[in-house]
Image (cartoon, rainbow, N blue to C red):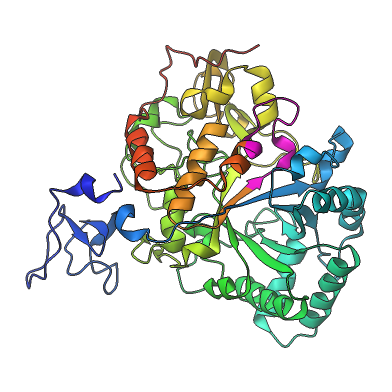
Amino acid sequence: MGLSTDYLGIPDWVNKPEGYQAGVTVRYNQNIFKTAFWGSEPGVGNPEENGWRFDDELYDLTSQTHTQEAKIIAYIPTWRKTEGFDYANEKIYQNITHGIISFLMFEEKNLGEFTQTSVNDVNEILDDVVTTGHKNNAKILIALGGATDYGFLYLMEKIGNNPSDPLLPQTVNKVVKFINDHSLDGVDLDLECWWAKNPGDPDQGGRPTGDPHPAGLGLTKFAERLKQALPLGKTVSAAVFATSWYGNNYDPKLADYVEWIGVMSYDLTGASDKSPVGPHTKLFSIREQKAYIPEQQEKPWPALPERPPKPDDNPIISVEDSLWYWSNSYFVNWQTKGQGLPRNKLAFGVPTYGYDFAYKKDQDPQSHEIPPGYKVIQYKDIVRNYPYSDTAPDANIKELGSTPRPDFVSHVPGNYPYAHNIYFETPETAVEKLKFLKYVGVQGVIVWDITGDDWQGNKSIIKALYQAKDLPVDLSAISGFYTKKQQYPNVPVGVEKVSQAAPV
């Protein structure tokens, strides 16, 4: 679905004094709506009282402006140097438009000061990245924050609660000086630590739309002041979560002060102990969620504390779902409406890693703790271990076996019937994603991260993206996407079968 020709038999909405009862489907303002309960006019009033729910977008009608030259924005983590990663590899920078060194972090107690450890880690790779990047016409930014930087959260929260706090100009000046001193091209703001730091601490997610977290308000003020203070031509950008649980913490006015907002539309499964098993960066909305029930660790689905339980509903979120949340003004969910940002302010995620849902995560190289969720495998390791994985159907590898369940699902009887069940991104799915995003007017993609790609072989995801970034897209292309979308099997490979991507 997604084109007007897919809905030829669906009537347009018309005003009826008696309204519409549950179970009705209509076309309205180039979108498709269904009634969950009695509805008046789609998109009007309180969604708790008006039962119309956005269901699909008619892209051939809504997407009038396409992206001509897409950005390929790749994150460059500092901690791979000890593994021997070559940060001066010219091939990397010949295949990206922007590289973002990650991360420069903040002290938790001495707010506004960089941690010396992160400064040292950044300095270890800075010269190689900036020199090689600029030599190959890639812009190089520095990322602030990251998944473990509570100091950034506390700093932004303090500024959000008091925008006149002297910490704001002091920190802005510190960041601007760092950028200028090291010939960087800008800064990326990665405010991510919305989860509890210690047992018993509250999670920061679940806010309604229109009520940003104080730290989200502080981030907007920080971006505004950075944009004012940086020399002309320097970039301010930001990264945000893909879904409303944490996405509503951000202030939509942030878009006014950044060149792009990178939506982290990966880890849509796999990142938590309560995650369903399934693709973590699927392009299109998955209509048949039940097809994934046979491969769940907990059946029919793990219970999600942040969602009211519904029959057969533990959604495997897609990139398309996150696109709608961030940019379609008619999007509604249980946290109320979406953000409604312009699509030309957004970029969406492409991962160079996958999740193996037979195992829990390994120890984190920075915190030395075992994070929640399932095992992460870099794409370069997947293609090394499974020679045909770069063309695996549905970007999924299933290898039969009998594996003890991760401890967080140890209450489930019996072993998991796979030795491996890996969902990941391939060059084909990444390019397909980029073409779709170009068609709907998105700036490009953010890639986490350069170190996970296959730079030693000929199966690079990032190189495939770069080669496709300037290709024209038109209606025939998006029609092809949707034809292929319908051809993708909703039911994953069964337990009795194994992916063609056989292990070495």
Nearest the viewer among 134 and 121 is 134
Which of the 4 quarters of the picture holds residue 36? bottom left
In percent of width and height, residue 71 lies at 61, 53
Magenta region includes residue 296: no
Look at the image and tell me whether residue 488 can be seen.
yes
Image point (47%, 62%), residue name: 343
- Residue 294 falls in image quadrant: top left
Residue 424 visible in the picture: no
Look at the image and say whether residue 450 sits in the magenta stretch.
yes
Q: Residue at x 33, y 47 (%)?
A: 310
Residue 90 at x, y = what percent? 81, 40
Q: Quadrant of the C terminus?
A: top right
Residue closest to the eye, 286 or 256 = 256
Quarter where residue 12 is shown = bottom left
In the image: residue 37, left or right of residue 138 = left
Rendered view: 418 above or below 467: above
Residue occupying image coordinates x 69% and y 28%: 380
Q: In this picture, is 227 found above or below 137?
A: below
| Residue 234 rendering spot, x and y as whole percentages | 74, 69
Q: Which residues are magenta?
A: 447-463
Depth check, front residue: 262 or 362? 262
Q: How many marks?
A: 0
Image x and y of residue 105, in percent: 80, 60
Query: Does residue 386 sit above or below 21 in this rendering?
Result: above
Asked if residue 203 lies left or right of residue 96, the reply is: left
Q: Is residue 455 left or right of residue 1?
A: right
Q: Quadrant of the N terminus?
A: top left
